Image (cartoon, grey):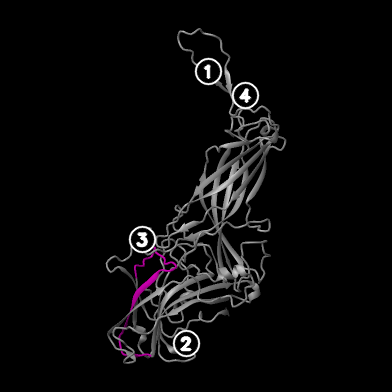
Amino acid sequence: MAALMPLESPLADPSLAPLPRTPAEFPAPLNTTLLGTSYGAKNCVVKINVFGHHAAKAFTTGELIRGTVNVTAPIDIPFRTITITLVGCARTTSYMGWTGGPKTYRIPLIRAPMLPYGWLPDPAIEGKFTSKTTYRQQFSFVIPEQLPSFHCFGACSNPDAAERHKRFHPTTGNFHLDDLAPTVTNIIYYISVEAVLKEGDDPKMSKLFQASYPLPIFPYCPDEPPRIITNQDVRYNMCNTKKLRRWLMPFSRSLGTLTAVASQPPAIMMNAHTLATTPTCARINLLFTPTTRGQGPPHIGSIKVALKACTFFSTRPMDCIPDMGDAPPALTASIPLEYSTKRVLVTVFPDAPSWKREQCEKCRGQGSPSSSVCFKPSLDDMGLDKNDAPMIDTREVPEGEEQQHRPPTVSWPIAPPEHRCEYPSYQALLRIRFGLENQKGTMFLPTFYSCTIARTYKLKLRMIVGPARHTMKFGVPLQIGVERYSQSKREPEPRSLGPNPDEGEGVTQHEVPAVHGQGRGEESSGEES
């Protein structure tokens, strides 16, 4: 049961509720009681039960949401209609100077009401709630594939951005885990129960009471094709070239040039019911061209993997894909603002990659069976003395044979071709496997682009290479998707994130006193102060 608060408290509006930011904090009921109603509605108890829901579970696209609503009134309370509705609302707030103060932009995402039939007993027969009588109604909603209408109001001229705005967006800023979103952004879905006293223009005077139950929803988001990154996309860096030296001093001997190209890894897929994620693998293609004859490829020291979450928000409809293209100028009213935070995932120390030596055209023309030869880095390549590079191979002579002086044979890492390449090149592929399972207390939202809020991810790779420990950095786009819901698939056990759900009744109960006379502003879009 939530604490009692006065009617003018902002908690009476679920879309304006403060956001929990600590891992151990679970969302409290978003409704409050009311004070001083002539119809006695302040003592009405509305109990909303959602079957199979607990704190560590979210709903997804195509899933059926079922539950019951119980209403108990202490005295006879007349009313006109009572409705049960699935409501969605997005809210962004800006505190920039050109707005003249805080500006809030709220836009309705979905509103799916149920028919007001099926109450047991039916209060519409008498037109009132009888005292000390519990009225019960069942409800069911199916989460749609996309939003029912286009919410950019024709303001988005970019067809790619407009298509993404029509998709169903995940819950943002109203989850019990830290979702890395700022407090000025909020996307909330909830079951709303409203009783209307009389029909009128003023919603504050017509509503008898209102209660709601928040629902975390993560819609289905498939693995999309890799994005095409060009030089205009300054937020990402897929290629890096570094001139390697034996030491850090500029006058030290140059070893060669290393070119590394990173590719976008497959999407990390999340299960909405268990919040479990699948690992993925990043790939880096290496090309090393030595500057001196006989120089082998360098040694790869370590690779640090970090994930940067970027949240874009605006009080106006966004007419672009915010993370693509040139970096926008700061502090402009037509450009969405950006809030970013970084989480270090893992630091790996990869094994020595299997380098392949690419022969020159003259070597290929001599009838060589293969154009590439497998190569392992020698001691000199790893920064040791060059005299230690050859390996002495001594063989035992069987007894009975004449002992003869045999010169030691030198075994080189590669078999030299008939023609010695002056400037060969070496190629290798690095695979870095990582996941999100070690990020306790953090919720990585799916990648999405809405009309006013967007969430993207950038994979930051920092590679240490060569004897002088040169640093190479990469910024690669990464998608986080959601698996499709399947009714035939058995749900695994949820990840333990907090208090265990109530196992006795099999449902999660959300018992709150009703809210009287509190009109909702998310039904009409536009800017509010």
| Whether label 4 touches label 1, CB < 8 Å | no
**451 or 332: nearer the eye?**
451
Determine which of the numbered discs, if any, sits on residue 394 in the image: 1
Secondary structure category for the residue under label 3: loop
Q: Is residue 484 above or below residue 396?
A: below
Using the numbered discs, state the Cα–Cα distance from disc 2 to disc 1 in whole angstroms. Answer: 95 Å
Secondary structure category for the residue under label 1: loop
Give the mark, 1 or 3, whose residue is nearer the N terminus: 1
Residue type at mark 3 is Glu
Residue 298 visible from this viewpoint: no
Per the image, the residue denoted by label 4 is 387
Q: Is residue 246 above or below residue 207?
A: above
Magenta-colored span: 51-79
Can residue 174 be found in the magenta stretch? no
Secondary structure category for the residue under label 4: helix
Quadrant assignment, res 189 = bottom left
Using the numbered discs, state the Cα–Cα distance from disc 3 to disc 4 in whole angstroms. Answer: 62 Å
Using the numbered discs, state the Cα–Cα distance from disc 4 to disc 1 in whole angstroms. Answer: 18 Å
Q: Which residue is the extreme one toward the right?
A: 251
Crowding near the residue tagged with mark 3, few <14, some 14–19, many ≥20 C-alpha atoms within 10 Å: few
Can residue 69 be found in the magenta stretch? yes
Residue in the image at 44% along x and 78% along y:
112
Residue type at mark 2 is Pro
Crowding near the residue tagged with mark 2, few <14, some 14–19, many ≥20 C-alpha atoms within 10 Å: some
Give the mark, 4 or 2, whose residue is nearer the N terminus: 2
Using the numbered discs, state the Cα–Cα distance from disc 4 to disc 2 in whole angstroms. Answer: 88 Å
Residue 184 visible from this viewpoint: yes
Per the image, the residue denoted by label 3 is 491
Crowding near the residue tagged with mark 4, few <14, some 14–19, many ≥20 C-alpha atoms within 10 Å: few
- Observer-side mark, 2 or 1, equals 1
Quadrant assignment, res 160 = bottom right
